[in-house]
Amino acid sequence: MAPITQILVVEDFVEWQVRIQTILRDHFGARTNIFVSATVEGADKEISRQKNRLDLILMDSSLGSGVFTFKFTKKIREVYSYSGPIIAMSTEPTYRKRMRDFGSSHACDKTWLVDYLKEHFPLE
């Protein structure tokens, strides 16, 4: 697996944004560029700007009503032709399954993100 250096985090709660950034830096290293968006609209702009350079997208599955997040994941795959990993994050198992149905390559419980990264994105 190529090194992961460009990550987009789509998360609306500031506390989780900070926690996730800390987890990502601890796992992937200080040189990792982490872009954070609290909204689908902001993430849309970032993906259109960075799509060929993003190595990983982590997306909260319950932004707003949740429906926008599901459709946005599908848009990332179909419109932007993004083939990299998208991790759907949620504490709700139902949302995680639904996100996989809409194109997320991974789905994990936010509270287990550290273990999930170690298992699915091991460092060389």
Image: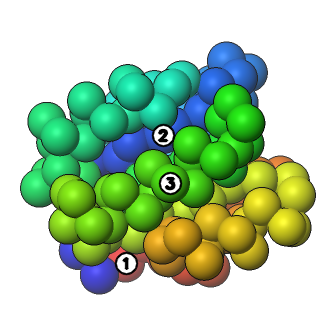
At x 55%, y 62%, the residue is 87
Q: Nearer the viewer, residue 94 or 53?
A: 94
Q: Of circles 3 and 1, which is in front?
A: 3
Q: Residue 62: x and y, percent?
A: 72, 42
Q: Position of residue 5 (x, y in %)?
A: 26, 51
Circle 2 residues within 10 Å: few <14, some 14–19, many ≥20: many
Q: Quadrant of the N terminus?
A: bottom left
Q: Quadrant of residue 92?
A: bottom right
Q: Which sits earlier in the primary sequence, circle 2 or circle 1?
A: 2
The residue identified by callout 3 is 71
Viewer-side residue, 75 vs 26 = 75
Residue where numbered disc 1 is placed: 124
Per the model, the C-alpha gap separating discs 2 and 1 is: 23 Å
**Colour mapping:** rainbow
Left of 63 or right of it: where is 80? left
- Marking on residue 9: 2
The crowd level at tag 1 (other Cα within 10 Å; few <14, some 14-19, many 20+) is few
Dot 1 falls on a residue whose secondary structure is loop
Tell me what residue is drawn at x 60 percent, y 77 percent. 101
